[in-house]
Amino acid sequence: MNPNNNHLVIMAGGVGSRFWPMSSTQMPKQFIDVLGCGRTLIQLTVDRFKDICPPENVWVVTSAAYADIVEEQLPEIAKDHVLLEPCRRNTAPCIAYVSWKIKAKNPKANIVVTPSDHIVIDGREFTRVVTSAMKFTADSDAIVTLGMKATRPETGYGYIEADLSMACPSNKEIYRVDAFKEKPDLETAERYLRRNNYFWNAGIFVWNVNTIVNAIRVYQPPMAKIFERLLPYYYTDKEQELIDEAFPACENISIDYAVMEKADEIYVFPASFGWSDLGTWGSLHENLKKDAHNNVCIGQNIKVYESRNCVIHTTQEKKVVVQGLDEYIVAEKNDMLLICRLSEEQRIREFSED
């Protein structure tokens, strides 16, 4: 594998506002410092690939509405490597667009695709797993998805059912996929957890550019034709105008439905590196370091008394004192303050959007 052929594609078009009041449709969670570490989630995503892909091979696909935010937060990425979607069409058109554009200049490209708003705790293990998967796909027709080893009966994730009876000869950590499973109910999730061949679908994919382009040609021919016709215009002044015209004609479909569930050479790399998609305040609480009373505190000067099982995110205040709370969220941003039970965050978020 030639590391200079390694490319990173970051999907950053989501409009997630689950971390209200910090996030909103104008400033989705991928562009905010959820962890209070001085780096936004998309910046942390770029950071964790620094030993996997050369910086000149990093791509971001995002909404045209977020172009200025991406440029501000990731000034090191070349402007023609920031692809702007004129409308939301899910992950398949996003991946098709960037794949055809990469192939136009580097037909030997080896690609890892990742969401922009996840966290990884064990960066060293993450680098090892992704590098190993990319070696596997560099000269093969394989599509690899990373499967997270389940630690609880999670109903918020899709699952991957793997055939663990025989590992791939060229990589003993990679197995064939038997099936992709939708987000389950609790009883089904508990059954998955009892078995050792079900893994969370992290939405991180590895393939070489010819493999994914050919798969889209086979399983989504109308979509393939759209981006094939634009080949003469990639990297030109006409590209964005033509994308704005053509992109809305793409089917609104995920890469899972469009390709993964149909293709034959689909594999899973079971892994464990402290992954979370940070879908809720509760998931933030679960994944970060806690004090002796199970509180997660993110801010410069937070004092907690007689409180437990809380998430307190107050990075803009000089001093915050919390007393007598159990399983609460306390979060502030730009003159907005949220105080609610962790169990009620979905309902409170709906109120906040009114």
Image (cartoon, grey):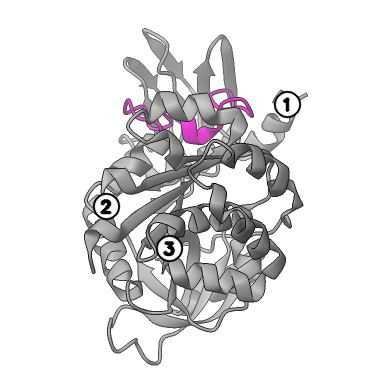
Quadrant location, the N terminus: bottom left
Q: Which residue is mark 2?
A: 122
Residue sitting at x 45%, y 19%:
323
**What crowding class fits label 3: few (fewer than 14 Cα within 10 Å), some (14-19), or many (20 or more)?**
few
Disc 2 packing (10 Å; few <14; some 14–19; many ≥20): few
Q: Is residue 75 visible?
A: yes
Q: Secondary structure at mark 3?
A: loop
Q: Amino acid at mark 2?
A: Asp
Residue at which label 1 appears: 353
Secondary element at tag 2: loop
Quick check: marks 2 and 3 in contact, CB under 8 Å? no
Q: CA distance from mark 2 to mark 3?
A: 16 Å
Q: Amino acid at mark 3?
A: Thr
Estimate the spatial distance between the alpha carbons at disc 1 and disc 3, rounded to whole Å: 32 Å
- Type of amino acid at the residue the image marks with label 1: Glu
Q: Considering the image in quadrants, where does the C terminus appear?
A: top right
Q: Earlier in the sequence, mark 1 or mark 3?
A: 3
Range covered by the magenta-colored residues:
20-40
Residue that carries the numbered disc 3 in the rendered image: 151
Does the magenta portion include 1?
A: no
SS for dot 1: loop
Q: Earlier in the sequence, mark 2 or mark 1?
A: 2
Identify which residue, 34 or 26, lies in the foreground. Answer: 26
Q: Single out the mark in the foreground, 1 or 3.
A: 1
Q: Nearer the viewer, residue 44 or 111?
A: 111
